[in-house]
Image: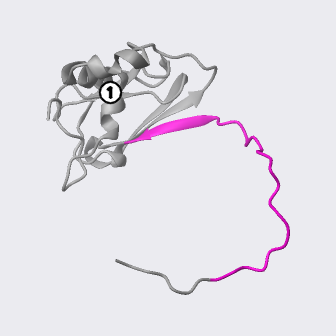
Amino acid sequence: MIKITKGLDLPISGLPDQRIESGSKVRSVAVVGFDYVGMKPTMAVKAGDRVKTGQVLFTDKKNEGVRYTSPATGFVSAINRGEKRVLQSVVIDVEEDEYESFTQYDASKLSTLTAEQVTENLVESGLWTAFRARPFSRIPTIGS
């Protein structure tokens, strides 16, 4: 266990301002292929297609059933590929906020859900890709 015995006290007077500033508007977002180790995509969209938040962009050939969804609503402006057609990124120009809707459950019913229902909901919504299997930080197979 690491224990820090000495620290650095910065001589800053006063308190920080208690305000939150809104940043500049995001114009484009991307799903980056290098974030998903060992993934081989089957594209469901092409450049110029309009997508909603949560809509399937591509699925994984190696990991059947895993869906990768759009993080924003807009138009697919580019699908960038590298050597040997490796997916580098899917770029989306952001527009209004429209989204796909998925099954929702009341908080009182969450304890009664089965593992299959939870897994199905995570896969459909594209949130299954947030999980990582050890030791190679890959997306786990469905049902594991």
Q: Check the picture and name the quadrant holding the N terminus.
A: bottom left
Q: Check the picture and name the quadrant holding the C terminus.
A: top left
92 up-or-down from 116: above or below: below
Magenta run includes residue 13: yes
Secondary element at tag 1: strand
The single residue placed furthest to the right in the displayed view is 14
Residue 22, image x, y percentages? 75, 40
Looking at the rendered structure, the number of numbered marks drawn on it comes to 1
Q: Which residue is mark 1?
A: 58
126 lies left or right of 71: left
Residue 69, image x, y percentages? 39, 27
Q: Which range is magenta?
A: 8-32
Residue at (21, 47) in percent of width and height: 133
Query: In front: 139, or 12?
Result: 12
- Graded by Cα atoms within 10 Å as few (under 14), some (14 to 19) or many (20 or more), the crowding at tag 1 reads some
Residue 56 lies in quadrant:
top left
The single residue placed furthest to the bottom in the displayed view is 6
Residue at (53, 27) in percent of width and height: 72
Magenta run includes residue 122: no
